[in-house]
Amino acid sequence: MLSVVVLISGGGSNLKALLDATQNPLYPVRILAVGADNPADGLEHAELYGIPTFVVSPSSFNNREEWAATLLSNIKHFEPDLIVLAGFMRILPPSFVASVSPRMINTHPSLLPLYPGAHAVHDAMVAGATETGVTIHIVDEGVDTGPHLAQAVVPVLPEDSETDLHERIKAVERQLLVKVVQDIAENKITL
Ligand code: GRF
């Protein structure tokens, strides 16, 4: 059984997909806790499953290093095998990454290395891309630069709004994330 702490910033649909997957006794993953950088709506999914949550907001700290150290100690309290960034919209400092690497993964809504950063779906549309997708990767010290674990392609349709496209990406992303975490648990993916 792979034990996981998930970090989110928003609605948490990727988190919910993981939580739903853990309802199957054959899914070899246990979510120990869910953390966020703000009182994110998605924390409700964890609460409904009776899973502990924590919020560590940067605004409560003097600097990013103090914030990250507190976030890290909250995570380490649960002693997870893996940290999953599922729509966590903060960049973690190198000291944080170094202390958990390679056991922290991120999901990103583009085919990296295309469109890194916080506006990947918008950037793909502005570039006139006819396809984009999702990448799940190990987190390194850069922004969306770590080694890729899996990718899936999503076509950009002519009538797509940014919201439409992101929703279609997220439908694929949720399935891929559930699969990648399972593959890590079953040693089919080695970090
Ligand atoms: C996902 O597309 C994630 O890759 C991106 O933000 C979205 C979060 O969605 N960074 P949700 O909060 O899991 O619904």
Image (tube, grey):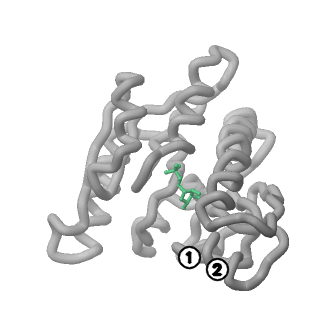
Q: Amino acid at mark 1?
A: Gly
Q: Which residue is mark 2?
A: 123
Along the viewing direction, whichever of 53 and 82 lies nearer the viewer: 53
Location of residue 43 (image quadrant): top left
Is residue 116 in view?
A: yes
Q: Earlier in the sequence, mark 2 or mark 1?
A: 1
> Within the image, what quadrant is residue 60 found in?
bottom left
Disc 2 and disc 1 in contact, CB within 8 angstroms: yes
Q: For the point 56% across and 74% down, which residue is it?
A: 119
Q: Position of residue 107 (x, y in %)?
A: 62, 57
Alpha carbons under labels 2 and 1: distance apart: 9 Å
Q: Is residue 171 left or right of residue 156?
A: left
Q: Is residue 106 above or below residue 145?
A: above
For disc 2, the neighbor class at 10 Å (few under 14, some 14 to 19, many from 20) is some
- Mark 2 lies on a secondary structure that is helix
Name above or below for residue 42 compared with residue 135: above
Query: Whole-percent x and y of residue 64?
Result: 28, 74
